[in-house]
Amino acid sequence: MFQIVVIDDDRSVQILLKRMLEKQGYEVIAASNGSEGIAKVLACQPALIICDWIMPGLNGLEVCHHIKTDPNLSTTFFILLTSLDSVADRVKGLDAGADDFITKPIEQNELQARVRAGLRLHQLSRDLQSQKLLLETEMAEAAEYVRSLLPLPMSELLTINYRFIPSRQLGGDCFDYYWLDPDYMAIYLLDTAGHGLKATLPSISVLNLLRSRALKSLNYYQPSEVLKALNDTFQMNYQNDKYFTIWYGVYNRIKRQLIYASAGHPPAILVSGKSVNVTEVKQLRTPGMPVGMFPEAKYIDGFCNIEECSTLYIFSDGVYEITKSDGTLWSLDAFIQMLVELQHRSQSQLDEVLNYLTNLNSKEAFDDDLSILQIKFD
């Protein structure tokens, strides 16, 4: 049974509305002023409220505003009872949050029809709210599953840490690192176009494919061949028009050599040097279209020797495509400069990076997924 709260300082109107509504099978709770009405509404959280506009103390607009700002009452339907009939008055009521109006003197058929309509909308809102809560729960579980697939930080032979912040519960960024054999480590980070589940699924597919080495004839030590195989496997025509960028590298810890290839991805940044005065910065990137765009895309390898005291950063474009408070877009060059400054200044560079980006961002959440890997070779 639906509960309805009637708020009116006129006792006769209370009695009239209570009788009309109870005849329709509703449970009716009456209040004689705004403060009493708010207290009863908070206590029972009714489906619908009928409130007089003109009352001593809190008037109907003030009661409506108070009710509508309470998230626990977001689905409660609010009807203002009024003798005011001008457009300007109705605009005031709507601005306060009223959902409907009933004009005095009260006509029984109109009252019943507006109450039925209001209760239908209340029930629809409740159903939508329940579905939204269910969906959010499922998305949170999916996000937790994605996080469970990511590798653990590493501290033996190499030191690898990361920060991963999807712009929503689910994002299109994904990364992994693992030993191909005792001397060679594969490292990659990919960024699927878009957000949400449609972007997450291709990322997980790539991660599982590479981690399981499901493509048996593929040379996983040759980054350009890996990207070509991914391009052959994940063409847009068969992946809901989704493509992704990726940086893939293989590190030989004995020779301290890195071979890498990229497909439309931001360059990895290699910062080397024992002090600020002798710091060297290299951008590791090779030409290549994003995976999935063109069937005949070509990919090539790049090579790099890793000097002592070197740190490699691999990231998605979300770490530097940030809108600042003045409306301008931050840049890759500014991001690289920040990495250089932090190289010798801080022992917790990734936390410093994240704090800086959070303060730099002009919005409550990042517009794009943010992922960054840090590999310290010594």
Image (cartoon, rainbow, N blue to C red):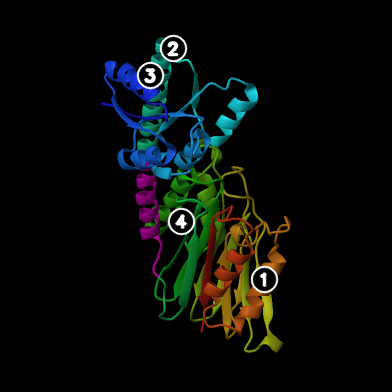
Mark 4: which amino acid?
A: Leu
Front residue of 325/217: it is 325
Does label 4 or label 1 sit earlier along the sequence? 4
Q: Residue 218 got which mark?
A: 4
Q: CA distance from mark 4 to mark 1?
A: 34 Å
* Mark 3–mark 1 distance (CA, rounded to whole Å): 62 Å
Marks 2 and 1: CB-CB under 8 Å?
Answer: no
Query: Distance from label 2 to label 3 (Cα)?
Result: 14 Å
**What is the spatial separation of the Cα atoms under label 2 and label 1, in whole angstroms?**
71 Å
Q: Is tag 3's residue or tag 1's residue first in the polypeptide sequence?
A: 3
What amino acid does circle 3 point to? Answer: Arg
In-front residue for pair 128/79: 79
Assess disc 4: are there few (<14), some (14-19) or many (≥20) residues with their C-alpha within 10 Å of its C-alpha: few
Disc 3 vs disc 1: which is toward the camera? 3
Residue 144 coordinates in the image, percent (x, y): 37, 55
Label 1 sits on residue: 336
Which residue does the numbered mark 2 point to in the structure image?
Answer: 107
Mark nearest the camera among 2 and 3 is 2
Q: Quadrant location of residue 331?
A: bottom right
**Dot 2 crowding, Cα within 10 Å, few <14, some 14–19, many 20+:** few
Residue depicted at x 32% and y 19%: 21
Comparing marks 4 and 1, which lies closer to the viewer?
Answer: 1
